[in-house]
Amino acid sequence: MNSEQAFDASELADLLGDKQDGEDKSLMSILEDVQARYRYLPKDALILISEWMGVPLSQTYSVATFYNAFSLKPKGRHIINVCLGTACNVRGSRKVVERIADRLGIEPGETTQDGEFTLETLNCVGACALGPVAIIDGTHFGRVNAAGADKLLKKLGVEGRKE
Amino acid sequence: MKTIRTPAELEELRGSLAREQDPARRVISLCGGTGCRALGSDSVFEALVERIEAENMGNQVTLRMTGCPGFCEKGPLMVIQPEGIFYHGVKVDEVPEIVTRTLTTGEMIDSLLYVDPSTGEKIAYEREIPFYKKQRPLLLEMNEKIDPTSITDYIALGGYGSLSKVLSQMTAEEVIDEVTEAKLRGRGGAGFPTGLKWRISREAPGDTKYVVCNADEGDPGAFMDRAILEGNPHRVLEGMVIGGYAIGADEGFVYVRAEYPLAAKHLAIAITQAREYGLLGKDILGSGFDFDVQIRLGAGAFVCGEETALMASIEGRTGEPRPRPPYPSQSGLWGKPTNINNVKTWGNVPIIIENGADWYAELGTEGSKGTKIFSVVGKINNTGLVEVPMGTTLRQLIFDVGGGIPNDKEFKAVQIGGPSGGCIPKEHLDTPIDYESLTELGAMMGSGGMVVTDEDTCMVDFARFFMNFVQDESCGKCVPCRLGTRAMLEVLTRITEGKGQEGDMKYLAELGQQIRASSLCGLGQTAPNPVLSTLRYFPDEYEAHIRDKSCPAHVCRPLIQYFIDVETCNGCGRCLRTCPAEAISGAKKERHVIDQDLCIKCGSCQEVCRFDAVIVE
């Protein structure tokens, strides 16, 4: 795991402190902030948030595991998302996922051993005219086919098959 | 900027903004929607800013990054006023020419003009392009005219005028009557009469009430809510404030899905600006009415588009639905009466108030009034957002506006309403679209997502795709949905693998009916629709898979094989280099061969072959 992801309890306290002054104190939005900061939800953070919110840990855990956007496992430094929505699917996005999975040597939902890449799929980002769409670290790429996926990976330093 | 305190002050501001606008002035609208941004409109915008500055034309030209005008296929899109010149596929290196030629003299750049594929003629003006000609934009109308991050752009075009009218001239009852008479129906898909819902919310006992905007547009292939929130967030806010006034709520929530970061950003900016201008907050326009709005972000759960699950999510719980009644209008967020409407429903409200119920009710069919936005995607030439009056036929939509099917392929069916909807084959293309006609055909209006399929789409595989989607997204609370969709998926998967059995079709139909009848929420109740409608219209395809172990569309991998044609292959080696399984062999300039034992049937070879030498059987 990357050192910058290490969970720091005092930092979370600051984050929660800021929330206290603001209006938005919902459990979901706090978890979203923590997920964005650490790219996963550390166990200690869930415990702290539950105490701070005054809700049972079981409830926080159930929310954290219900929604696709939350992860209890650390995600990679680069997050590769491929849209599998209907329009992208009709245009062959499954082949793109397979190609990337093959190159990275992981299945969708997994992270490479070195913590560099996470491959995920999602259902429609609303850019259907550009399908198949891949989103790498928040940037959208349109009309990606299997060969295009290779090029995108090459830019990220993945050439050929990653072992 | 100062707070607007009265309707007269709003009118005064609108007047002065309008006077500042010179109708002859050059205005460049560049689309900044998610689609065009993915195609590089961000850098085109930067280049334009730089170039206009370098040419010292800043005081003659207004440059605007707008919302989506719908023609996503051709992005990045640019419209230049006052003429209405339409450029598509604009790239950074074309910017200098646009500035020096078009902006100064109005001279058109040929290579950027749209070419009508049916006539081969170039079309210079947006209003003359077939894609736009047959549309009737109401909700999307302002998208290309305003910068969504500027409240004054919206006010200049009359924005918040409906709110002003409501607060100064109408009682809550009158507002509800107006919406009722307009016969507006819920645009989330179910089509519940909006006026009636508002009345139930208003009459529900309680001092604290809420309004909610459902912007959890989860139907894959639908993106009109995204386009509205990105392109014109103030209209949605204005509708919500009017709704709050009508039902007696002083607080509203917009639940936006996490996959739409730009929509959430523009909405947040709009809320901040509306507060600054006094159009949200305490004593709006001096009426004594208080109202404010908060954003809640979803976290990637399709079921949260269902209203009871959505409310659970806003309350910070897992997004699991609960039985209705009680309906949210009676007991919603934190047990209080809550009026939930879709983005488009809220967006229609200011339009109805501005133009009147009679005007609005003239558009559309007997039972379905107004316009409807469809996202036409999949195997279609003009992918994009299309707003047409209710009652337009599928044929007009797909062939006249959508430009038909690419690559001379044949239209097979259109899937309407996403995973809850169904497919409609070509014999019903002349059906006028409204809530009832689609339901009769086994589809549903849904959010308006329309996925067009052609001869290369396998309908069994397509049904399996949707079943896989709902199975994945089923929250697991009720048994029919959790286990029933799984059972259906298993059978469908088996069929696509060539292991289908006699009786499978009957089993799917029966199980589908049971899931429909017994699931807890709309997700489960509509989940079997894609399967039931493909069984209804394409039984031959199911039978071919089950009896002949063949996939007529050449999609289902266990049922197909890839070959390289002896006559056509010239041994160029492209497929050999691309094959991820190293299944292709052959010397240079000699015919290549696929080793069937190694082939994973990914189709990469077919994709890269320039001579159509790879065939599927």
Image (spheres, rainbow, N blue to C red):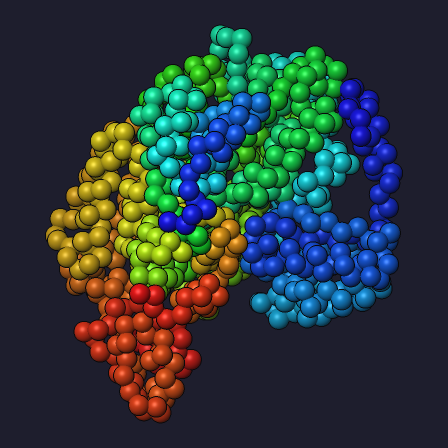
Residue B217 appears in view: no
Q: Is residue B10 left or right of residue B474?
A: right
> Who's the residue at 17% across and 45% down the image?
B506
Residue A66 at what x, y percent from top left? 34, 34
Image mark count: 0
Judge whether B414 appears above or below B265 on screen: below
Residue B302 at what x, y percent from top left? 39, 38
Judge whether B528 appears above or below A76 on screen: above
Camera-side residue of B413 and B89: B89
Q: Quadrant of residue A63?
A: top left
Furthest-bottom residue in this view = B589
Q: Is residue B282 left or right of residue B185?
A: right
> Who's the residue at 76% across and 59% down the image?
B50
Residue B311 at what x, y percent from top left? 43, 25
> Who's the residue at 72% across and 27% down the image?
B276
Residue A86 at what x, y percent from top left? 40, 51
Camera-side residue of B394 and B341: B341
Residue B347 appears in view: yes
Camera-side residue of B26 and B459: B26
Q: Quadrant of the C terminus of chain B?
A: bottom left
Q: Quadrant of residue B540?
A: bottom left
Q: Quadrant of the N terminus of chain B?
A: top right
> Who's the residue at 63% across and 67% down the image?
B115
Q: Is residue B216 left or right of residue B573?
A: right
Judge whether B27 appears above or below A99 on screen: above
Camera-side residue of A6 and B383: A6
